[in-house]
Amino acid sequence: MPVRKARSSRRPRRKRQPVVPFQLVPANRVRAVFAVLCLGLVGLSGRMAWLQVLKSSELEARARAVQTKRTQPLGTRRSIVDRNGRLVALDEQRYRLWAHPRYFNFPGDDPDLLRKPIEVARKLSGILPISMGQLVDRFGDRASGVKLVEGLNSETAAEIRGLGISGLDLEPYPQRVYPQGQIFANVVGFLNQDRVPQAGLEQSRHEELLRFEQPRSMRLGKDGTPLPDDLAPGVFYEDNLSLQLTLDARLQELASKVLTRQVAKWKAKKGAAIVMDVVNGELLVLASTPTYDPNKYWEFQPSLFREWSVQDLFEPGSTFKPINLALALQEGVINPEGKVYDNGKLNIGGWPIYNNDRQVHGLIDFPKLLQVSSNIGMVKTMRHLEASIYWDWLQKLGLDERPDTDLPGAVAGQLKNKDEFVHHPIEPATAAFGQGFSLTPLKLAQLHALIANGGHLVSPHITRGLRAGNSLAPRGSVRKNVLLRPDVTRTVRNWMESVVEKGSGMGVKTPGYRIGGKTGTAQKARNGIYQPDLKVCSFIASLPADRPRYVVLVVVDEPKGNNAFGSTVAVPVAKQIIDALLVLEKIPPSNYQAKFNAAKI
Amino acid sequence: MKKLKNSLWQRFLPLPWEFWPAESRLLIALVGFWCLAGLLILGSSSWWVASREMGDGAYYIKRQLLWMTASWSLFFLTISTRLRTWLKLAGPGLLIGCLLIGLTLIAGSTVNGASRWLIIGPLQIQPSELIKPFTLLQAANLFAHWKRITNDQKFIWLVIFLALIGMILKQPNLSTAALIGILLWLIAFASGVRINGLFATALAGGIIGTTSILFNEYQRLRVISFIDPWKDPQGNGYQLVQSLLAIGSGGWFGEGYGLSTQKLQYLPIQSTDFIYAVFAEEFGFVGSMMLLIFLMLVGFMGLRVALRCQSNQSRLIAIGSITLLVGQAIMNIAVAAGVMPTTGLPFPLVSYGGNSLIASLIIAGLLIRCSLESTGLIEERPLRKIRAQMV
């Protein structure tokens, strides 16, 4: 046997060693070893059957609970951007920190150990802007559900999460932020603490601003990688639509700054500035003052939350005169080359009417009439137009109906009823110089856009629509609602241009550009009586006068001082807005030669 | 015969293929299949983690393939080497192994609270793995003629074995110590040593094991968490809970190859100790049963080889090698399935790790060598003579 030989070679034979007969390793024992292994394997198959067949569904459910992440909709809202994509309103992720002192435990602790609130407060006070004592006070002796702090940003939240303290819970929630602050408050409005819209577009376009969200459930790797199985179609769809405005943030900012300064200078009650695209009715500026900061709305009077340029009425005064002239021209009751005699005083139905400046202008043509803003001239001119036709026209212009607009809360103007208008001669007479009826600044801008664009009524609006990502909405299409003949509007525009050239609107003269305009200083009535020292100063401009693209309207309510007129209060504001508008919208000069000459000087 | 001479690969075989017993042919095929399947399972379990942590999904596979090549070379070397040579090497090999294990206690690198590794340049050596074949061989030496050797011989080797187990326990590596203890016991049992003494030893071993667990916090925590892992699923029970969730998620037919979710970093050490959990999640109960039947088949082949062996040593080597291979697989599965305390033990030929691969393939090679020598054709005479005869 080889074995015996091997053995003998390994070990020197010893004499005393008793001879033990060779015994082969017993086969039964070898089989028994195999049996032991088989027993182990059979035992394991039993265990496998228990785990994978009997307990499988329970274990799988537990596993899925750990592996699956479910997210519930947070109720986020879409962003609002200006015409160039600048953010006006957006949702930011913030966190609310809840504490449950009965689960306080640090990482690495015995799971049964309960940490004291003071220990947790010590760790938190380094991160939160709250002192340890205050934190302990907030914990009180409550066992759970303590709201520690709100409005944490993502970085702070990540730091707190990094501490790994159990018993702390970070609840994400969206926070509406208005990066432009006061500038857009009047337009956009705000959400209150419960995210209920309170004013502006947030309120009027609430449904459209709600972001489409769906509860989402997906399996993740432990590092957070989502797995493709069990995913419903469209789970990853993210609504990144934003509501695009027609407003231009830069222009809006400038307008509201200039306006605020001017209103403060004249100690006026309020002011508004509107820049409208006359072709399609888009508003580039809708600024008003005083306004509020939507990020801190609670610090302001609720009366500020409404946009008065859209919701409040005023008597337009002289800024309405060009429109009246256009109506007279349209009806053919006056000759564009005609003249009218301004004798300085009229008495209609017992009511005396004077010019603003109490002067006698004599025989004047229509451009001159606008330049000196003659009330008597206007009354005499509009006498040619039959009162009922005049009233029909005012109604056709939509004075007494709500303008077709997306601006929240826009209201209709007030017009005397037809009977009164026709039977009292004083009514058409005062209407001739823009008193006796009232409209919103927005409506006035719309009517001047009608003159500027060749005779059609546009729908003033501030939203272009919803767009995904960074893409911008196209300019709105034009719906033609033609009211006046182009030659009529051209004539009136030429007259208005002369107001800027040599009349009360000289303040907006810009070398190289042709600008038409008209000032207005209307008297305010209180309790039906006109108050001599309560005025509304306004100025309307359309530019460029040869082919207008924009109207600019500035209205300042109740400026104080004897020198407060449209030309002194409203025109300087309009001038600055026009300057910025020309640059921002890259409007070429009307007359290059004029610009060249201006440069030489 | 001419055809045989001409074919190149026959030269690498210790015995012409025609003379191979059916068991050894089947065994070599089973081992090949085992390795291949092991690579696939390792690929699935390690890819995600490797691509996250190493930046290369194939990181572990590549290294395992390298080790696999080396191990298969050693596998064929083992098949070509006479058992007598191996048995002569067993004693010195065991002693060197003991020295190296002693070194791990002094200068070993510590992973998860256990110092099992010696780091020599780029190589990580795990002496407690490499010592397994030598333990097997020396045990065969010792127990083959238990009644015919002197008491001091018995005493010396038993003390060495005890010291070996003691040092592995000290690392601490409870599962390897237990595996080696069980191996020695089963070989002693197979050799026909009297039952009474054996049970006394088993009892003593049980007491030593319990004491070790009680005095070693690392192991005590493992054992306590094994009894009720759900008590602290985020702490000490975490590994076992994740493993049970993985196995349970498999259900009847599994998630499908590569589709385990638990392997995505939920399951810790998913490429070594808990690789079975990944397999079970992907292949389900059916796959688990096939694996267990496969192991039983390997064991049965080992049994047939052992029964065919003419010498005591080779008979013990044969039964010992299947005890090591199948027994280690059983222990690995038992750990993953929560019927044994959670202690690190690789699944032979599947888990990532070069030391384990080398040891396992040498053991498999010894088993096949036993089978070849049981034919009686290659033991005594050198290879050349047989070839000459056949030509």
Image (cartoon, coloured by chain):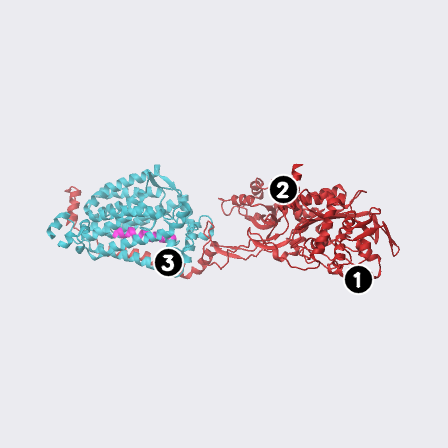
The C terminus of chain A is located in which quarter?
top right
Residue linked to disc 3: B283
Question: Please, what is the three-letter code of the amino acid marked with disc 3?
Answer: Phe
Q: What's the mark number on residue A388?
A: 1
In primary-sequence order, the first of circles 2 and 1 is: 2
Tally of numbered discs: 3
Is residue A41 visible from the viewing direction of this image? yes
Based on the picture, tell me whether residue B322 belongs to the magenta stretch: yes
Q: CA distance from mark 2 to mark 1?
A: 75 Å
Of residue A202 and residue A60, the one placed in the foreground of this image is: A202
Q: Which residues are magenta?
A: B319-336
Residue linked to disc 2: A134
Is residue A196 visible from the viewing direction of this image? no
Residue placed furthest toward the front: A337
Pinpoint the chain carrying mark 3: B
Of residue B103 and residue B285, the one placed in the foreground of this image is: B285
Identify by letter the chain in cyan.
B
Q: CA distance from mark 1 to mark 3?
A: 92 Å
Based on the picture, tell me whether residue B19 belongs to the magenta stretch: no
Q: Main secondary structure of the magenta part?
A: helix
